[in-house]
Image: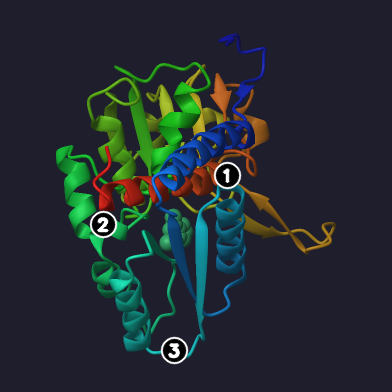
Protein backbone atom coordinates (compact mmCIF):
# COMPACT_ATOMS: atom_id res chain seq x y z
CA UNK A 1 0.00 0.00 0.00
CA UNK A 2 1.38 3.39 -0.95
CA UNK A 3 1.63 6.21 1.57
CA UNK A 4 2.61 8.74 -1.10
CA UNK A 5 0.22 11.66 -1.18
CA UNK A 6 0.44 11.86 -4.96
CA UNK A 7 -1.07 8.38 -5.25
CA UNK A 8 -4.66 7.55 -4.61
CA UNK A 9 -5.79 5.11 -1.94
CA UNK A 10 -6.18 1.36 -2.27
CA UNK A 11 -9.88 0.76 -2.86
CA UNK A 12 -11.11 -1.93 -0.46
CA UNK A 13 -13.37 -4.25 -2.46
CA UNK A 14 -16.31 -5.11 -0.20
CA UNK A 15 -18.02 -7.15 -2.90
CA UNK A 16 -15.00 -9.43 -3.26
CA UNK A 17 -14.41 -9.86 0.48
CA UNK A 18 -18.15 -10.40 1.10
CA UNK A 19 -18.15 -13.11 -1.58
CA UNK A 20 -15.27 -14.87 0.25
CA UNK A 21 -17.21 -14.70 3.50
CA UNK A 22 -20.37 -16.04 1.88
CA UNK A 23 -18.32 -19.02 0.60
CA UNK A 24 -17.11 -19.63 4.18
CA UNK A 25 -20.67 -19.26 5.49
CA UNK A 26 -21.86 -21.80 2.90
CA UNK A 27 -19.21 -24.26 4.13
CA UNK A 28 -20.47 -23.75 7.69
CA UNK A 29 -24.05 -24.32 6.49
CA UNK A 30 -22.99 -27.50 4.65
CA UNK A 31 -21.40 -28.80 7.87
CA UNK A 32 -24.68 -28.21 9.70
CA UNK A 33 -26.69 -29.88 6.92
CA UNK A 34 -24.43 -32.95 7.21
CA UNK A 35 -25.48 -33.13 10.86
CA UNK A 36 -29.15 -32.93 9.93
CA UNK A 37 -29.60 -29.27 10.89
CA UNK A 38 -31.03 -26.87 8.30
CA UNK A 39 -30.14 -23.34 9.40
CA UNK A 40 -33.14 -21.03 9.11
CA UNK A 41 -33.37 -17.25 9.29
CA UNK A 42 -36.67 -15.44 9.84
CA UNK A 43 -36.75 -11.84 8.60
CA UNK A 44 -39.57 -9.59 9.75
CA UNK A 45 -40.48 -6.46 7.79
CA UNK A 46 -43.06 -3.98 9.06
CA UNK A 47 -44.50 -1.39 6.66
CA UNK A 48 -43.20 -0.38 3.25
CA UNK A 49 -40.05 1.69 3.74
CA UNK A 50 -38.36 1.22 0.33
CA UNK A 51 -34.81 1.04 1.74
CA UNK A 52 -35.87 -1.54 4.36
CA UNK A 53 -37.64 -3.56 1.65
CA UNK A 54 -34.47 -3.53 -0.46
CA UNK A 55 -32.30 -4.63 2.50
CA UNK A 56 -34.69 -7.47 3.36
CA UNK A 57 -34.68 -8.57 -0.30
CA UNK A 58 -30.89 -8.78 -0.32
CA UNK A 59 -30.89 -10.73 2.96
CA UNK A 60 -33.34 -13.30 1.56
CA UNK A 61 -31.28 -13.63 -1.65
CA UNK A 62 -28.12 -14.20 0.38
CA UNK A 63 -29.91 -17.00 2.26
CA UNK A 64 -30.78 -18.69 -1.04
CA UNK A 65 -27.18 -18.47 -2.20
CA UNK A 66 -25.76 -19.76 1.09
CA UNK A 67 -28.20 -22.64 1.59
CA UNK A 68 -29.92 -21.05 4.59
CA UNK A 69 -33.67 -21.54 4.67
CA UNK A 70 -35.42 -18.17 4.97
CA UNK A 71 -38.83 -17.19 6.23
CA UNK A 72 -40.05 -13.69 5.37
CA UNK A 73 -42.81 -12.22 7.52
CA UNK A 74 -44.42 -8.99 6.42
CA UNK A 75 -46.70 -6.90 8.62
CA UNK A 76 -48.72 -3.90 7.47
CA UNK A 77 -47.62 -0.44 8.52
CA UNK A 78 -50.79 -0.29 10.65
CA UNK A 79 -49.98 -3.51 12.57
CA UNK A 80 -49.89 -3.09 16.35
CA UNK A 81 -46.80 -3.60 18.45
CA UNK A 82 -48.56 -6.56 20.11
CA UNK A 83 -49.05 -8.22 16.72
CA UNK A 84 -45.31 -7.88 16.07
CA UNK A 85 -44.46 -9.22 19.55
CA UNK A 86 -46.76 -12.20 18.88
CA UNK A 87 -44.94 -12.94 15.61
CA UNK A 88 -41.58 -12.74 17.39
CA UNK A 89 -42.86 -15.05 20.14
CA UNK A 90 -43.93 -17.66 17.58
CA UNK A 91 -40.46 -17.52 16.01
CA UNK A 92 -38.85 -17.77 19.47
CA UNK A 93 -40.83 -20.97 20.10
CA UNK A 94 -40.24 -22.50 16.67
CA UNK A 95 -37.40 -25.08 17.00
CA UNK A 96 -36.78 -24.95 13.23
CA UNK A 97 -35.90 -21.22 13.33
CA UNK A 98 -32.34 -20.33 14.39
CA UNK A 99 -32.14 -16.63 13.57
CA UNK A 100 -34.65 -13.80 13.98
CA UNK A 101 -34.11 -10.37 12.42
CA UNK A 102 -36.64 -7.55 12.75
CA UNK A 103 -35.69 -4.96 10.15
CA UNK A 104 -35.25 -1.47 11.64
CA UNK A 105 -36.41 1.25 11.78
CA UNK A 106 -39.88 0.27 12.99
CA UNK A 107 -42.89 2.57 12.55
CA UNK A 108 -43.07 5.30 15.20
CA UNK A 109 -45.96 3.69 17.12
CA UNK A 110 -43.71 0.73 18.00
CA UNK A 111 -41.05 0.68 20.72
CA UNK A 112 -37.89 -0.77 19.14
CA UNK A 113 -36.28 -1.55 22.50
CA UNK A 114 -39.28 -3.56 23.65
CA UNK A 115 -39.36 -5.52 20.39
CA UNK A 116 -35.61 -6.25 20.46
CA UNK A 117 -35.80 -7.39 24.08
CA UNK A 118 -38.54 -9.84 23.10
CA UNK A 119 -36.26 -11.72 20.67
CA UNK A 120 -34.69 -14.87 22.15
CA UNK A 121 -31.01 -13.81 22.65
CA UNK A 122 -29.92 -17.20 21.27
CA UNK A 123 -31.64 -16.32 17.95
CA UNK A 124 -30.67 -12.63 17.93
CA UNK A 125 -28.56 -12.63 14.74
CA UNK A 126 -28.45 -8.81 14.81
CA UNK A 127 -26.73 -8.88 18.22
CA UNK A 128 -28.99 -6.07 19.43
CA UNK A 129 -30.50 -7.78 22.51
CA UNK A 130 -29.15 -6.32 25.79
CA UNK A 131 -27.84 -9.78 26.75
CA UNK A 132 -25.65 -9.92 23.63
CA UNK A 133 -24.67 -6.24 23.97
CA UNK A 134 -23.52 -6.98 27.52
CA UNK A 135 -21.63 -10.14 26.52
CA UNK A 136 -19.82 -8.27 23.74
CA UNK A 137 -18.83 -5.50 26.13
CA UNK A 138 -17.24 -7.96 28.59
CA UNK A 139 -15.69 -10.14 25.89
CA UNK A 140 -17.88 -13.28 26.09
CA UNK A 141 -18.41 -15.06 22.76
CA UNK A 142 -21.87 -14.11 21.46
CA UNK A 143 -23.83 -12.94 18.43
CA UNK A 144 -22.46 -9.50 17.44
CA UNK A 145 -23.99 -6.85 15.16
CA UNK A 146 -23.39 -7.60 11.48
CA UNK A 147 -22.26 -4.22 10.13
CA UNK A 148 -19.52 -3.48 12.68
CA UNK A 149 -18.48 -7.17 12.73
CA UNK A 150 -17.72 -6.98 9.01
CA UNK A 151 -15.36 -4.02 9.34
CA UNK A 152 -12.33 -5.81 10.90
CA UNK A 153 -12.79 -8.43 8.16
CA UNK A 154 -12.62 -5.74 5.46
CA UNK A 155 -9.51 -4.20 7.01
CA UNK A 156 -7.49 -7.32 7.85
CA UNK A 157 -8.37 -9.17 4.63
CA UNK A 158 -6.96 -6.13 2.78
CA UNK A 159 -3.62 -6.79 4.48
CA UNK A 160 -3.90 -3.93 6.99
CA UNK A 161 -2.91 -4.63 10.59
CA UNK A 162 -5.18 -3.34 13.34
CA UNK A 163 -3.45 -4.18 16.62
CA UNK A 164 -2.04 -1.10 18.34
CA UNK A 165 -3.63 1.34 15.87
CA UNK A 166 -5.71 4.34 16.83
CA UNK A 167 -9.27 3.80 15.59
CA UNK A 168 -11.64 6.76 15.59
CA UNK A 169 -15.34 5.97 15.22
CA UNK A 170 -17.68 8.81 14.26
CA UNK A 171 -21.20 7.94 15.41
CA UNK A 172 -22.65 6.39 18.57
CA UNK A 173 -25.67 4.44 17.32
CA UNK A 174 -26.61 1.12 18.89
CA UNK A 175 -26.43 -0.52 15.44
CA UNK A 176 -22.92 0.61 14.45
CA UNK A 177 -21.02 3.13 16.60
CA UNK A 178 -21.29 1.59 20.06
CA UNK A 179 -20.79 -2.06 19.06
CA UNK A 180 -17.94 -0.95 16.78
CA UNK A 181 -16.11 0.52 19.78
CA UNK A 182 -16.61 -2.68 21.77
CA UNK A 183 -15.31 -4.83 18.90
CA UNK A 184 -12.26 -2.64 18.24
CA UNK A 185 -11.17 -2.53 21.87
CA UNK A 186 -11.16 -6.35 22.34
CA UNK A 187 -7.91 -8.25 22.53
CA UNK A 188 -6.93 -10.16 19.38
CA UNK A 189 -5.36 -9.58 15.97
CA UNK A 190 -8.56 -8.28 14.39
CA UNK A 191 -8.93 -5.57 17.02
CA UNK A 192 -6.69 -4.47 19.91
CA UNK A 193 -7.06 -0.84 18.85
CA UNK A 194 -6.91 2.34 20.87
CA UNK A 195 -10.46 3.61 20.42
CA UNK A 196 -11.92 7.12 20.30
CA UNK A 197 -15.64 7.68 19.74
CA UNK A 198 -16.76 11.03 18.30
CA UNK A 199 -20.38 12.08 17.77
CA UNK A 200 -22.66 15.06 17.18
CA UNK A 201 -21.66 16.45 20.59
CA UNK A 202 -17.92 16.39 19.85
CA UNK A 203 -16.15 19.78 19.81
CA UNK A 204 -13.30 20.18 17.32
CA UNK A 205 -14.08 16.91 15.52
CA UNK A 206 -11.24 17.21 13.01
CA UNK A 207 -8.67 17.32 15.84
CA UNK A 208 -9.66 13.72 16.61
CA UNK A 209 -10.27 12.39 13.10
CA UNK A 210 -6.85 13.65 11.97
CA UNK A 211 -5.23 11.39 14.58
CA UNK A 212 -6.92 8.24 13.28
CA UNK A 213 -4.99 5.38 11.70
CA UNK A 214 -8.38 3.74 11.13
CA UNK A 215 -11.30 6.14 10.63
CA UNK A 216 -14.83 4.76 10.63
CA UNK A 217 -17.65 7.08 9.56
CA UNK A 218 -21.16 6.08 10.65
CA UNK A 219 -22.77 9.49 10.70
CA UNK A 220 -25.68 9.48 8.25
CA UNK A 221 -24.74 12.77 6.56
CA UNK A 222 -23.89 12.55 2.83
CA UNK A 223 -20.20 13.19 2.01
CA UNK A 224 -19.55 14.74 5.44
CA UNK A 225 -15.93 13.63 5.83
CA UNK A 226 -13.47 15.62 3.72
CA UNK A 227 -9.74 15.27 3.03
CA UNK A 228 -8.74 17.95 5.58
CA UNK A 229 -10.15 15.70 8.34
CA UNK A 230 -8.02 12.67 7.41
CA UNK A 231 -4.41 11.78 8.24
CA UNK A 232 -2.26 10.83 5.28
CA UNK A 233 -2.25 7.06 4.80
CA UNK A 234 -5.23 6.40 7.09
CA UNK A 235 -7.66 3.53 6.44
CA UNK A 236 -11.09 5.09 5.91
CA UNK A 237 -14.22 2.95 6.33
CA UNK A 238 -17.48 4.49 5.12
CA UNK A 239 -20.59 2.98 6.75
CA UNK A 240 -22.99 5.58 5.31
CA UNK A 241 -25.62 4.71 2.73
CA UNK A 242 -27.40 7.95 1.85
CA UNK A 243 -29.87 8.46 -0.98
CA UNK A 244 -29.32 11.85 -2.63
CA UNK A 245 -31.58 13.16 -5.36
CA UNK A 246 -30.08 12.76 -8.82
CA UNK A 247 -32.42 13.24 -11.73
CA UNK A 248 -29.81 11.88 -14.14
CA UNK A 249 -30.30 8.44 -12.56
CA UNK A 250 -33.32 6.44 -13.71
CA UNK A 251 -34.24 5.82 -10.02
CA UNK A 252 -34.15 9.55 -9.34
CA UNK A 253 -31.44 9.18 -6.69
CA UNK A 254 -27.91 7.88 -6.23
CA UNK A 255 -26.21 6.36 -3.21
CA UNK A 256 -23.37 8.18 -1.49
CA UNK A 257 -21.54 7.47 1.73
CA UNK A 258 -20.65 9.68 4.70
CA UNK A 259 -17.23 10.23 3.11
CA UNK A 260 -16.49 12.61 0.23
CA UNK A 261 -14.83 9.77 -1.66
CA UNK A 262 -13.21 11.75 -4.50
CA UNK A 263 -11.68 14.20 -2.01
CA UNK A 264 -10.53 11.67 0.62
CA UNK A 265 -9.12 9.03 -1.75
CA UNK A 266 -6.08 11.23 -2.48
CA UNK A 267 -5.12 11.38 1.22
CA UNK A 268 -6.20 7.99 2.60
CA UNK A 269 -4.04 4.87 2.34
CA UNK A 270 -7.10 2.67 1.85
CA UNK A 271 -10.79 3.47 1.53
CA UNK A 272 -14.11 1.67 1.08
CA UNK A 273 -16.42 2.82 -1.73
CA UNK A 274 -20.20 3.28 -1.52
CA UNK A 275 -21.77 1.18 -2.85
CA UNK A 276 -19.54 -1.91 -2.80
CA UNK A 277 -17.77 -1.43 0.54
CA UNK A 278 -19.35 -2.05 3.93
CA UNK A 279 -22.86 -2.74 2.56
CA UNK A 280 -22.33 -6.23 1.10
CA UNK A 281 -20.40 -7.25 4.21
CA UNK A 282 -23.43 -6.76 6.46
CA UNK A 283 -25.41 -9.41 4.60
CA UNK A 284 -22.43 -11.80 4.45
CA UNK A 285 -21.89 -11.48 8.23
CA UNK A 286 -25.60 -12.14 8.76
CA UNK A 287 -25.14 -15.53 7.06
CA UNK A 288 -22.20 -16.26 9.40
CA UNK A 289 -24.27 -15.23 12.41
CA UNK A 290 -27.15 -17.47 11.32
CA UNK A 291 -24.82 -20.48 11.06
CA UNK A 292 -23.29 -19.54 14.44
CA UNK A 293 -26.73 -19.27 16.08
CA UNK A 294 -27.65 -22.72 14.72
CA UNK A 295 -24.39 -24.18 16.09
CA UNK A 296 -24.87 -22.55 19.48
CA UNK A 297 -28.50 -23.67 19.75
CA UNK A 298 -27.46 -27.23 18.90
CA UNK A 299 -24.41 -27.01 21.21
CA UNK A 300 -21.91 -27.66 18.39
CA UNK A 301 -18.51 -25.98 18.75
N1 LIG B 1 -31.49 -1.29 9.80
C1 LIG B 1 -30.30 -0.78 9.40
N2 LIG B 1 -29.31 -1.66 9.66
C2 LIG B 1 -29.89 -2.73 10.24
C3 LIG B 1 -29.39 -3.97 10.73
O1 LIG B 1 -28.18 -4.26 10.72
N3 LIG B 1 -30.31 -4.82 11.23
C4 LIG B 1 -31.62 -4.53 11.29
N4 LIG B 1 -32.44 -5.41 11.84
N5 LIG B 1 -32.12 -3.39 10.87
C5 LIG B 1 -31.25 -2.50 10.32
Label 3 residue SS: loop
* Foreground of the two, 86 or 188: 86
- Label placed on residue 230: none
Q: Classify 10 Å Cα crowding around label 3: few (below 14), some (14-19), many (20 and above).
A: some
Q: Quadrant of residue 89?
A: bottom left
| Residue 253 drawn at (x, y percent) | 73, 60
Q: Classify 10 Å Cα crowding around label 2: few (below 14), some (14-19), many (20 and above).
A: many
What's the residue at 50%, 16% (across, down)? 159
What's the residue at 58%, 51% (across, down)? 62
Work out whether residue 199 can be spotted: no
Cα distance between the residues tagged 3 and 1: 30 Å
* Foreground of the two, 44 or 181: 44
- Label placed on residue 79: 3
In the displayed structure, does residue 85 sit left or right of residue 57? Answer: left
The quarter of the image that holds ligand 1 is: bottom left
Q: Quadrant of the N terminus?
A: top right
Q: Which residue is mark 2?
A: 122
Label 2 residue SS: helix
Amino acid sequence: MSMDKADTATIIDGNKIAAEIRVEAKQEVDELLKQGIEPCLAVVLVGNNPASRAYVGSKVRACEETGVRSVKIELELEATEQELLDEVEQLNQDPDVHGILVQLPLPHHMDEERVIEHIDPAKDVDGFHPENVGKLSIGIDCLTPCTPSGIPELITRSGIHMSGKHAVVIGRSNIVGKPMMNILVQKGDRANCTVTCCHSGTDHLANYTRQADILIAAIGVPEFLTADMVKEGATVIDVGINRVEDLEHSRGYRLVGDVDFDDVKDVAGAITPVPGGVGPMTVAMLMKNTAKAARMIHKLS
